[in-house]
Image (cartoon, rainbow, N blue to C red):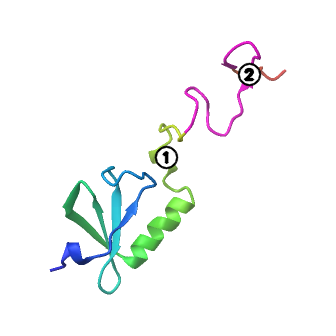
């Protein structure tokens, strides 16, 4: 049995608050990688290094973006569509671009 407290857990967050909810990752014996939520540290999911590496590469290659397509990016303006520059009226809010002719 693994002593979870003895592992070197890495927080997957950029939040400076040490109590902020986040995922933690730790390397285990052999090729094992452990994941847990910091608010429930006794509930640990274990996978292999090969599967973890494949997951990370999938994230980097945008293979999981469909899970978060409705989640606004940090600093996003409500109503703006990611990847499209809105047309702005100097006297008002963002407007839809004109229809093609």
In the image: residue 84, left or right of residue 58: right
Q: Which of 59 and 27 is in front in this view?
A: 27
Give the residue displayed 32% in from the left and 87% down from the top. 30
Give the residue displayed 51% in from the left and 63% down from the top. 58
Q: Where is residue 15 in the image (x, y as percent from the top left)?
A: 42, 51
Q: Give the range drawn in magenta.
A: 75-94
Q: Position of residue 48 (x, y in %)?
A: 35, 77
Q: Quadrant of residue 25?
A: bottom left
In the rendered structure, find residue 23 and report the number of the disc placed on it.
none
- In magenta segment, residue 6: no
Q: Is the magenta stretch mostly helix, strand or loop?
A: loop
Residue hosting label 2: 88
Q: Residue furthest left?
A: 1
Vertical position of residue 65 compared to residue 50: above or below: above
Vertical position of residue 96 compared to residue 12: above or below: above
Residues under labels 1 and 2: Cα distance?
Answer: 28 Å
Q: Is mark 1 on a helix, strand or loop?
A: helix
Q: Which residue lies furthest to the bottom in this view?
A: 30
Quadrant occupied by the C terminus = top right
Which is nearer the N-term, disc 1 or disc 2?
1
Count of number-bearing discs: 2
In the image: residue 96, left or right of residue 100: left
In the rendered structure, find residue 66 and report the number of the disc placed on it.
1
Crowd class of label 2 (few under 14; some 14 to 19; many from 20; radius 10 Å): few
Q: Which of 88 and 70 is in front in this view?
A: 88
Vertical position of residue 90 compared to residue 66: above or below: above
Give the residue displayed 51% in from the left and 49% down from the top. 65
- Mark 1 or mark 2, which is nearer to you? 2
Give the residue displayed 34% in from the left and 63% down from the top. 24
Quadrant occupied by the N terminus = bottom left
């Amino acid at each position: 049995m693994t002593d979870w407290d003895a592992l070197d857990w890495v927080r997957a967050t950029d939040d400076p608050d040490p109590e902020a909810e986040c995922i933690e990752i730790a390397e285990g014996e052999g090729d094992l990688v452990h994941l847990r939520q910091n608010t429930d540290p006794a509930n640990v999911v274990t996978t292999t290094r090969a599967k973890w590496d494949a997951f990370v590469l999938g994230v980097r290659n945008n293979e999981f973006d469909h899970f978060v397509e409705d989640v606004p990016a940090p600093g996003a303006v409500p109503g703006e569509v990611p990847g499209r520059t809105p047309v702005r009226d100097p006297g008002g809010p963002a407007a839809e671009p004109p229809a093609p002719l």
